[in-house]
Amino acid sequence: MALQGLKRSPAADCVTLAETALSRLRGKADPFTEATFRSALAHTYAKAGRRGEAVAEVKRTHELMAVPHPPEEIPFWVLAWGPPAGTVYARLGEVFNTLDDPANAAGQYAHAAASRPDGTYARVNALNTTAEARMHLKQGHIEAACDAWRRSLDLMAGVHSARTRKAVTEMRQELAVFRDRGVRQATDLDARAGALLASVGRA
């Protein structure tokens, strides 16, 4: 509810929901489940402009992720989103993106994609890798951005999704200025992206 509320409700209300959820969970769940809740709380703090508290929750989340634990302890409803590490790191990417910290955001999105098997989670890994590319671009690192976008296009092969099509379209828009300057990587990526969109349109 807290995360859904971030799309349509005041961030302060979402903080209250996330804090309440964590208080009821604390001491009753495995480390990965608690990390999932803390990453959500960190996101609400970031949206509410409470930077210090958001960063503190990110630190606690990372500490929990480092605790060894038997996989069978993780509830089925946490696994519904896929491997918990991927879920948590993707959320932390959103936290740092909200805090306007693209360097850390890029690292978290990369961790998220690396935490899931490509074949089963190609779509979400492609979207996380696209988000990583945008964070590199925000820092002016065009080569790193193009490398991440290349990996995201690799993952999108055979994926039919409105979100991935939107991601590819936005990628082409962001690459346009570099393509027009004759940057080879941008030109090659734009050609691949155009071919991918054309093939999806024919499917």
Image (tube, rainbow, N blue to C red):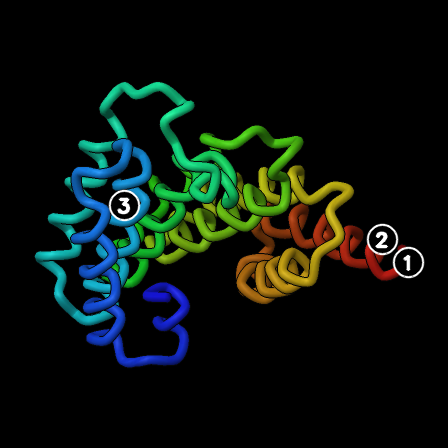
Which residue was labeled with disc 1?
202
Counting from the top left corner in percent of width and height, residue 80 is at 52, 43
Quadrant where the N terminus lies?
A: bottom left
Q: Earlier in the sequence, mark 3 or mark 1?
A: 3
Q: Residue at x 43, y 42 (%)?
A: 78
133 displayed left or right of 155:
left
| Residue type, mark 3 in image | Asn
Which residue was labeled with disc 2?
199
Q: Residues within 10 Å of mark 2 (few under 14, many from 20)?
A: few
Counting from the top left corner in percent of width and height, residue 171 is at 58, 59
Assign a secondary structure to mark 2.
helix
Question: Could you give the CA–CA distance between mark 3 and mark 2, rounded to whole angstroms?
Answer: 34 Å
Farthest right residue in view: 202
Q: Are marks 1 and 2 in contact (CB under 8 Å)?
A: yes
Which residue was labeled with disc 3?
104
Quadrant where the C terminus lies?
A: bottom right
